[in-house]
Image (cartoon, grey):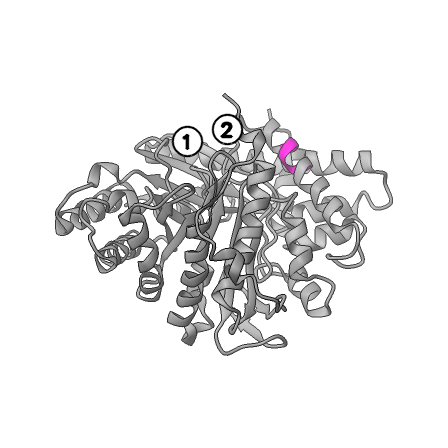
Amino acid sequence: MLNIYEVNETNNMIEREKLDVRTITMGISLLDCADSDLDALNEKIYKKITTLAKDLVATGRDIERDFGIPIVNKRISVTPVALVGQSACKTLEDFVTIAKTLDKAAREVGVNFIGGYSALVSKGMTAADKNLILSIPQALAQTERICSSVNVGSTKTGLNMDAVELMGRIVKETAEATKDRDSLGCAKLVVFCNAPDDNPFMAGAFHGVTEADAIINVGISGPGVVKVALEKARGANFEVLCETIKKTAFKITRVGQLVAQEASRRLGIPFGIIDLSLAPTPAVGDSVAEILEEIGLERVGAPGTTAALALLNDQVKKGGVMASSYVGGLSGAFIPVSEDQGMIDAVSLGALTLEKLEAMTCVCSVGLDMIAIPGDTSAATIAGIIADEAAIGMINQKTTAVRLIPVIGKKVGDTAEFGGLLGYAPIIPVNPFSCEKFVTRGGRIPAPIHSFKN
């Protein structure tokens, strides 16, 4: 039973501490839409999405009104399109027609993003996989709401370095294709290692083949709530600090669980998972960097940053799993630069570098996220950064990802503007030395020895 103190506490979290449900994401399987005729395939995809998700946005708004809990985004994820389009799509232009159909369906039902323009190529690429990947720059340039992801490695299979090298080129081509918007297309493109099947967060969401026909996944947030809680524990030892984070994460997750169950009931679609990630926004006071600074760092990026982030990530997960039996997705602390004012400030001051961000990804959720780099960065260097990040995920049996934005026409000292939730970012320096001979060797980096568990 809730008491009046807990009700008031939750109200304060929402009204003063920026607690929100970041997204309700409906996952939709498109496997039954597969068809050898491209027009029939597109028609089936459009009909299924607009039928199943027709009430998603309205239901989210009703829950907001009835419970007083902000739900920032309503989104859709679909089966990786490379699988769905395998029979019908013989060229990259064929895949672009599916991107446009998905975009049209997303616009029709009113969601802000639809994810799943994706390929899973951790061990090898089919012709369809390669065509989809080659179509990504065109697809993202010609649509508004499409998000794309490619999984290039896993702990079980190793790293597909052919796919890594190709994605370095695709990121650069996407930047060129959207250069009139500060290379915004790259903000909707993620390269994964160990991608989860049930991630509700964009740009990396897709509906895995192990999932049901349709599912409701909820991603919660609340960096501001954690920061306010930690302000009350200033000077306390690590035991008190950890207990404070755990208890706060528990309360945040319970709010997400309530919304998830209610959305599931009203839509008549099974509840999948709660992703209890701390997802920041550009708003002041809604920052993961500010949490780390509240823990005791002068600026995020200072010595001790990786340890502080490891502590935060672990306690968030421990608190969250007590609040819900179905925690999944990515779950942890996101460290996107452009979407976190504290991260932006730290980069601008020189406290936070690309190399330090990479070290932090060893212990946090996801990886190098929303980082603007000089537009003249080579495709090989981008591939090398992807390889480094994927290797961290492969060896440590965790999800890692790269969302780099080489902003065409801009250099270190400039700023890229992405707008809205995507924020803005200072251009961060990149190591100038070449790795081209490494990333172009071809083949696979084998799975690590500890992957052999049967």
Ranked by sequence position, the earlier of labels 2 and 1 is 1
- The amino acid marked with disc number 2 is Tyr
Image position, residue 94 (x, y; %): 21, 56
318 within the magenta span: yes
Q: Residues within 10 Å of mark 2 (few under 14, many from 20)?
A: some
Residue appearing at x 33%, y 30% in the figure: 212
- The amino acid marked with disc number 1 is Phe
Q: Are marks 2 and 1 in contact (CB under 8 Å)?
A: yes
| Type of secondary structure dominating the magenta stretch | helix
Q: Secondary structure at mark 1?
A: strand
Residue at the spot of label 1: 271
148 within the magenta span: no
Image position, residue 231 (x, y; %): 78, 48
**Left or right of 382: which side holds 76?**
left
- Front residue of 292/70: it is 292
Residue at the spot of label 2: 326
Residue appearing at x 74%, y 37% in the figure: 244
**Left or right of 442: which side holds 304?**
right
The span picked out in magenta is 315-319
Residue appearing at x 52%, y 60% in the figure: 437
Residue appearing at x 54%, y 47% in the figure: 390
| Quadrant of the rendered image containing residue 173 | bottom left
Q: Residues within 10 Å of mark 1 (few under 14, many from 20)?
A: many
Q: Quadrant location of the N terminus?
A: top right
